[in-house]
Amino acid sequence: MKLKRPGCRLAKIGGSGKRSAQMKWKKLLLNRRFQLLGFVLLLLGMAVCISAWRVGISLDDLKDWWRALTDFLRESPIWLFVALVILPGFPVPTSALLFVAGMVWREHPVAACAIQLVAMMINLSWTYWLAGGFGRRWAERMFGALGIKIPELQGSSHLRMVLVLKLTPGIPFFVQNYLCGFLQVPFRLYLLVSLVCNGIIGTGIVLAGVGFGDGKLVPALTGISLVALGILLTGWIRGWLGRRKASDSAEH
């Protein structure tokens, strides 16, 4: 009887994993909707650049506007806090807001990280309750008129749903929060998981903004390391969920 070396098996698994990842990327790049989105974004970028050039906006003008904005936010920090609370509930790049917060509050990095966590907690709360209250009642009336009942999550499905929404790449931050509220995931569970999943990366982005804004290497490297840690943790949990799902399917 010929025994197979475990190293060969691991190599095959690793090779199949790489091929699978390459196939997914190839499929994504060949997707017509993805190509159309890229083309539209390219056209929009070119239109903005041409419009700015025709109007006469220069790089120095952009620097002056940026300096004026940061000076205003530094003198009136409440407006930046309000932006961190409200804007992530809409299709606004949350990472850009956090990076700006780090640059504006770079003189107080610890306070900047604490403030962004408080703002994130408030945003997570109001988006959850809005979707779980008004949004849920509106959807129930609309679907009820069509004879469709919204399914209810049971037991352990709550944790899995939060993790899937928070760990799946490409789902916008505000969509994650609204869906968790709409599906009536327990609030404490949702808030805790969200603060762990989003808080680590959010704090890293703020510290990166502190480092780049102040020209200091340590905060920038710390922030980048936290972002990398958050991504690695996300990947590990996603893999654990995949293995658990596979084992549950095998048992059934």
Image (cartoon, rainbow, N blue to C red):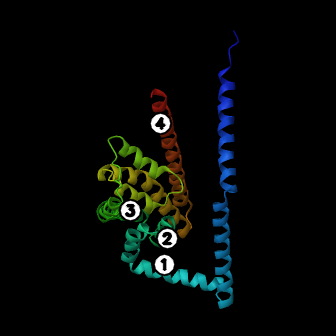
Mark 1: which secondary structure? helix
Q: What residue do we see at 68% from left, 18% from top?
A: 4
Quadrant where the image shows the C terminus: top left
Q: Earlier in the sequence, mark 4 or mark 1?
A: 1
Towards the viewer: 217 or 100: 100
Q: Which of the two discs, 4 and 2, sits closer to the camera? A: 4
Can you identify the residue that label 4 sits on? 245
Disc 3 vs disc 4: which is toward the camera?
Answer: 4
Q: Mark 2 = which residue?
A: 100
In 3D space, how far apart are the residues under numbered discs 3 and 2 (Cα atoms)?
15 Å
**The residue under label 3 is which amino acid type?**
Met
Q: Quadrant of residue 85?
A: bottom left
Q: CA distance from mark 4 to mark 1?
A: 47 Å
Q: Which residue is pictured at 36% across the width and 46% down the height?
A: 158
* Label pair 1/2, CB-CB below 8 angstroms: yes
Of the two numbered discs 1 and 2 on the same chain, state the one appearing first in sequence.
1
Q: Position of residue 131 (x, y in %)?
A: 34, 62
**Residue beneath the point at 53% across and 81% down:** 67
The quadrant of the image that shows the N terminus is top right
Q: Is residue 224 above or below residue 213?
A: above
Question: Circle 3 sits in a helix, a strand or a loop, which is it?
Answer: helix
**Which label number is shown at residue 120?**
3
Give the Cα separation between the discs numbered 1 and 2: 8 Å
Position in image of residue 185 (x %, y %): 33, 51
Amino acid type at image mark 1: Thr
Res 199 quadrant in image: bottom left
Among the two numbered marks 3 and 4 on one chain, the one whose residue lies closer to the N terminus: 3
As displayed, is residue 233 above or below residue 204? above
Which mark is on residue 70? Answer: 1
Q: Counting other residues with Cα less than 10 Å from the Cα at mark 2, is it few (<14), some (14-19), or many (20 or more)?
A: many
Judged from the image, the secondary structure of the residue bearing numbered disc 4 is helix
Numbered disc in front, either 1 or 3: 3
